[in-house]
Image (spheres, helix red, strand yellow):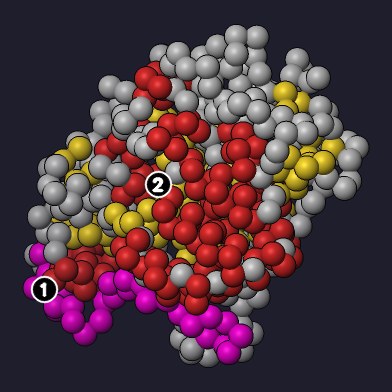
Amino acid sequence: MRHSDVREEGASAQADGDIPGGGAGAPGTVPGPRGGSRSARRTGDARPPRRGRRRVLRWVSSVLSLLILGTAAAGYLYYRHLNGSIQTDALNLGENKLGGSKPNAFGQTPLNILLIGSDARNDAENQALGGATDTFDGPPLADVQMLLHLSADRSNMSVVSMPRDTMLMMPKCTEPGGKVHPASKGLVQTNESIQRGGPGCTVAAWTELTKIPIDHFMMIDFKGVVRMADAIGGVPVCVEQNVHSRTRDGKGSGLKLPKGTSVIQGETALQWLRTRYGFEDGTDIGRTHAQHQYMNSMAREFRKNAKLSNPVKLNSLAQAAIEAMVVDTGLNKIDKLFDLSMELKKVPPGRITMTTMPWIYSTKPGLDGRVEPKPGEAEDLFRMVREDIALDGQGSASPAASATPGAPASPSAPAPQQPTTAPTAAATAAPPAKIAVTVRNSTGGKDGAVAKVKGRASEVAALLTGKGFTKVVADTQTGAEDTSVIRYATDAQAADAAAVAAALGLPAGSVQKSDQVAGIVVFVGKDWRTGGTPTPPPPAPTKAPDSAHALNGDNDQACMAIQPGFTW
C-alpha cells in the first residue's frame, strides 16, 4: 500500500516541495514594505521534529478556492466559455449522507465546503513542481484538508484545518462504478482517504468524524497554485528571521526569505505553502499555521487588489483555476461558482477565523509522530461549526429576535440555499401503530470505555410502545454510538423515522439514512444510559478552544517563527 511516508522518502532532490530557485531576491519574491521582525507569538505546540523522514508536497487549496470564487465574481463575463472545462466528481461516497446544511428559523442556510489539496503528479507540470519521481502517476494524497464554514447569516466564516498526519477510522466508500472500499479495521492516515475512490471519500471521512453536513468540495493541484499566485500579483507574508528551508541532506522546500515581510508569488508561493522544515518546530502543525497566514493575507489582498479589474488577468486566472480544479457536481457551472463567490464576499476579513483541529500525539504502536483528534476539544470545535457558532466569540448578525421564525431572510441576508431538507414528522408519516421500529443497545459508546447497560434496548422499546408504537422490537444485535441516532433504509421511511425521533425527544439531526439497516433502527447511545430522554449535552462553547490556535483575518501582523538552524 502506498503510504505518505513512502512518498516523502523518495530519492528525488526536490524534497518537501523543493523547487530550484525562489529564494530571497529570486523572481517571484519581492521584499515587502514593512520589513523588520514581528512580535507575533509562536503558535505551534512543542513537538519533536521528524528529521529525515518526510518530504512533504504541500500547499493550501483553500486559499486557491477563495481566489477562484472571488475571481468568478469579478470576471464572470470573461469565462462563461469555461463551463465545459469544469471537472467534477461525486460529493460523498460514504454511507453517512447527512444531506445539505439545514435552514435556521429565519430561512437562512449555512454553507460547508471541504477544500482539498491533491499532490497528484499526473502530468509533466505537476511532476516538475512536485518532485518525488518514484510517485509519478501514482495515486494522489489529500495532503491539505480544510473545512470552510460560511455562517447562515453571512456575518462570519470559520475554517478548520486537519493535520495531514491525523489518524482516523476510514468509512466504507463506494465508487460510482460500484467498486467498494471496505471500512478500515484500523486507523488510517487521513490523506489516504482520496485513494479510496476520490475526493468523495475524503468528504465521507470528514462527515463520519465531525457529523457536519458538507455541501460542496473543491480540490486543486500543484500547478494551480503557481498560475494563480502569478495572476493575483503576489501575497505578503512575514518571517521573524531570515529563513532557508533546506536540511543538510537536501530536504526542505528551498524557500529563502529575508526577515520581515516579502510579497511572494509563483513557485515561491508554492514553496511557502509547502514548507515544514524551517517554520516553528519543523512539523506539519507549523506548516498549517503558515498556510493560515497566507490564506488570510490572500483574502485581504484580493479585496483591495485593483489588478483583478484587468480582463487579461481575470481570464488567465480563471483558466488556471478551472484547469487545476475538481468540484462536486453541485458546482459544475460557472454561474454556480459565481453565486457562491457572491456569498463568500459578504464576510469581512475581520470575521474570518482560521483554526487547526485540536490534536494529540497518538500513543498507539507504530504511529510514532502521528496525531489524533484531541478528545473533547476537537469535538467542541466541530460542534460550533455544526451549530453555526462563530469561532471568534463575536456571535452573529442574525435577524432581530422579534422577527417571525420561519419567515424569509431579511433583504440584506442571502437567499436561502436549496438544501436537502431534513425529514420531518409531517402528515406524510404513518400512524405510530403502523411504524415498525427496531431498538439496539449501543450504550457502550464507540470507545468501549464503559460497559453497555443491560436491558437498555428493551427499556427504550417500552417507551415507544407507551407512545403508541406497537410494532417495536428490542434487538439482540447491539451497536456502539456516543450519541443516540435513528437510521432508516429508504426515502419512504424518512418521515416515519422523524416521527420516531420526535416521540423520543431526539433532535432532527439524529435521523440518518443508511444502507446498513433494513428498516427504522433506534441506536441507544452512550448519552442515554438511563431515563426517559437522552442526557442533554453541555452548553456549546462560545469561542474556539485555545488549542485551535485561531488566527483572525484582519491580523496583518502575523509572522512565522523560525526553527533554529534554518536561518541565514
> Which quarter of the image is occupied by the C terminus?
top right
Residue type, numbered disc 1: Ala
Helix, strand or loop under label 1: helix
Secondary structure mainly formed by the magenta segment = loop
Q: Is residue 236 magenta?
A: no
Left or right? Give the position of 392 relative to 94: right
Rendered position, 434 above or below 22:
below
Rendered position, 195 above or below 461:
above
Left or right? Give the position of 344 relative to 509: right
Which residue bears the numbered disc 1? 433
Left or right? Give the position of 156 relative to 7: right
Residue type, numbered disc 2: Trp
The x and y percentages for residue 184 are 26, 32
The range drawn in magenta is 409-437
Asked which quadrant contains residue 546, the reply is: top right
First in sequence: mark 1 vs mark 2: 2
Which residue is drawn at the image coordinates 67% and 61% (left, top)? 302
Q: Residue furthest front?
A: 312
Q: Residue furthest top?
A: 249
Using the image as rendered, state which of residue 283 and residue 56 is in the foreground: 56
Which residue is drawn at the image coordinates 58% and 33% (left, top)? 274
Estimate how packed mark 2 is, as few (under 14), some (14 to 19) or many (20 or more) residues with alpha carbons within 10 Å. Answer: many
Which residue is drawn at the image coordinates 64% and 56% (left, top)? 232
Which residue bears the numbered disc 2? 206
Can residue 243 be seen here? The reply is: yes
Q: Mark 1 or mark 2, which is nearer to you?
A: 2
Left or right? Give the position of 309 relative to 132: right
